[in-house]
Image (cartoon, rainbow, N blue to C red):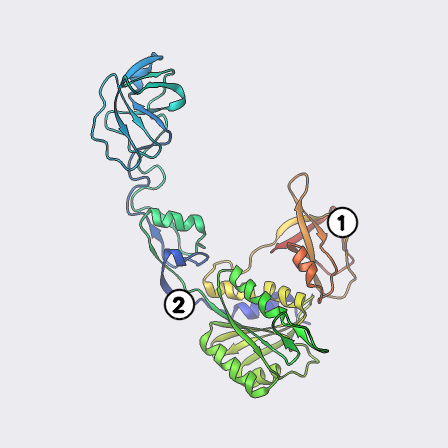
């Protein structure tokens, strides 16, 4: 068996960033900036009010309560066409520009407005600048808003549009093909014949690909035929940036996938010191990475988390391809037996009374028991030995 870190580094060394592309902002969620985003002007672009209320001069209400003449109403999006002078106020709505002459806003709750008389009673004094959001309070002109390497979230996209960056330079979104092989696999809700199983891995892996911001390409199920598998793999490598398969990677397997990949790809067949997901195949068809994951459903998901996800993240341009685990604690005894491997237990992690995440087994730990993966939200990293005692620290990979 080889160490996990060695196997993962072998993968990362062969997963290089994809070319940079200009992408419309609405298509950039989850992608990684390749060039900085700069503000083209101040944000906000003008002094505006943070409250519904009245714009006025702070000096006029120093001896409040006072009564002022209301000379205008300014809505959001309006351009003020007046300049306030002594004894005057303007009714103003949240987000509207502060009119010239005003240096404070008093919230509507501190006023009594007589609309018919055009006058307002202000109950309390306010300081200069009260409830005014000055131009450039968030961003100054030509400021670097986001540096290269930033993964674009929904908030990032909002900021980009606010500074006029409706197109950004990012690492291209990877197209990741997912393919299943095997005469025993069927797809659909119909009744199963003896020896048949439903192809859950392909749907699971496609969802995992999509959840990390890549584009999953469903390449379907290919029967156990050497020529069909060869054609499918070559076509997948031609149209995709990476290919993910499941099954046929164990040392004892006699599988057409292994035969074909040994012929058309530069593959390394590994036994990694982990449980589940010990068998791993990884290599390239030309320059296209190929991830050969185990066939057991849980093993397939764990192997994706440990190897395919970091590799695809590297292709997307993430500066940190491997996300660090979260430090939590065992909520129960996380038992195991010593076997020379690191175990990745399926657990449910919930906040304890002090906010620290506590891990408990989420179900059976067999590599075929996918329900435990579904019922949990994390993998607990349990080093070789007898396990982790309740209350002791444990590293968690949140999913």
Q: Which mark is residue 277?
A: none
Of residue 272 and residue 363, the one placed in the foreground of this image is 363
Quadrant of the rendering where the N terminus is positioned: bottom right
Residue 394, compared with residue 267, is above or below; it is above
Residue 255, compared with residue 338, is above or below; it is below
At a point 64% along the width and 55% down the height, the residue shown is: 378
At a point 74% along the width and 64% down the height, the residue shown is: 366
At which x and y percent is residue 254? 67, 84
At a point 29% along the width and 22% down the height, the residue shown is: 56
At which x and y percent is residue 335? 78, 56
Q: Which residue is mark 2?
A: 19
At which x and y percent is residue 354? 66, 39
At a point 41% along the width and 65% down the height, the residue shown is: 172
Say few, some or many: other residues with alpha carbon within 10 Å of mark 1 (under 14 / 14 to 19 / 20 or more). Answer: some
- Under tag 2, what secondary structure? loop
Residue 285, compared with residue 164, is above or below; it is below
| C-alpha separation, residue under disc 1 versus residue under disc 2 | 47 Å
- Under tag 1, what secondary structure? loop
Quadrant of the rendering where the C terminus is positioned: bottom right
At which x and y percent is residue 389? 77, 50
Q: Earlier in the sequence, mark 1 or mark 2?
A: 2
Q: Which residue is mark 1?
A: 332
Which image quadrant for residue 70?
top left
């Amino acid at each position: 068996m080889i160490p996990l870190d060695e196997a993962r580094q072998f993968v990362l060394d062969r997963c290089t960033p994809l070319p940079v592309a200009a992408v419309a902002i609405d298509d950039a969620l989850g992608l990684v900036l390749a060039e900085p985003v700069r503000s083209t002007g101040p944000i906000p672009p003008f002094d505006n009010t943070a409250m519904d209320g009245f714009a006025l001069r702070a000096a006029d209400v120093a001896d409040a309560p006072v009564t002022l003449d209301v000379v205008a109403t300014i809505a959001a999006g309006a351009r003020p066409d007046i300049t306030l002078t002594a004894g005057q106020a303007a009714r103003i709505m949240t987000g509207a520009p502060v009119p010239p002459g005003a240096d404070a806003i008093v919230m509507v709750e501190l006023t009594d407005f007589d609309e018919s008389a055009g006058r307002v009673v202000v109950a309390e004094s306010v300081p200069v600048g009260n409830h005014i959001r000055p131009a450039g309070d968030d961003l100054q002109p030509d400021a670097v808003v986001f540096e290269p390497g930033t993964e674009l979230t929904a908030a990032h996209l909002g900021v980009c549009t606010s500074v006029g960056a409706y197109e950004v330079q990012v690492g291209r979104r990877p197209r990741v093909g997912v393919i299943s092989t095997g005469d025993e696999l069927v797809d659909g809700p119909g009744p199963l014949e003896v020896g048949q199983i439903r192809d859950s891995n392909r749907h699971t892996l496609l969802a995992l690909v999509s959840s990390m911001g890549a584009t999953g390409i469903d390449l379907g199920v290919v029967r156990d035929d050497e020529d069909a598998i060869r054609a499918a793999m070559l076509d997948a490598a031609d149209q995709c940036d990476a290919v993910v398969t499941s099954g046929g990677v164990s040392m004892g397997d006699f599988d057409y996938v292994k035969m074909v990949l040994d012929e058309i790809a530069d593959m390394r067949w590994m036994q990694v010191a982990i449980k589940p997901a010990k068998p791993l195949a990884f290599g390239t068809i030309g320059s296209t990475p190929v991830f050969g994951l185990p066939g057991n459903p849980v093993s397939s998901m764990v192997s994706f988390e440990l190897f395919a996800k970091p590799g695809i993240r590297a292709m997307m341009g993430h500066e940190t391809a491997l996300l660090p685990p979260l430090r939590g604690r065992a909520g129960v005894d996380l038992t195991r037996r010593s076997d020379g491997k690191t175990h990745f237990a399926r657990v449910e992690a919930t906040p304890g009374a002090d906010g620290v995440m506590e891990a408990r087994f989420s179900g059976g730990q067999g590599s075929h028991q996918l329900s435990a993966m579904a019922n949990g939200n994390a993998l607990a990293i349990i080093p070789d030995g007898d396990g982790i005692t309740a209350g002791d620290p444990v590293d968690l990979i949140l999913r």
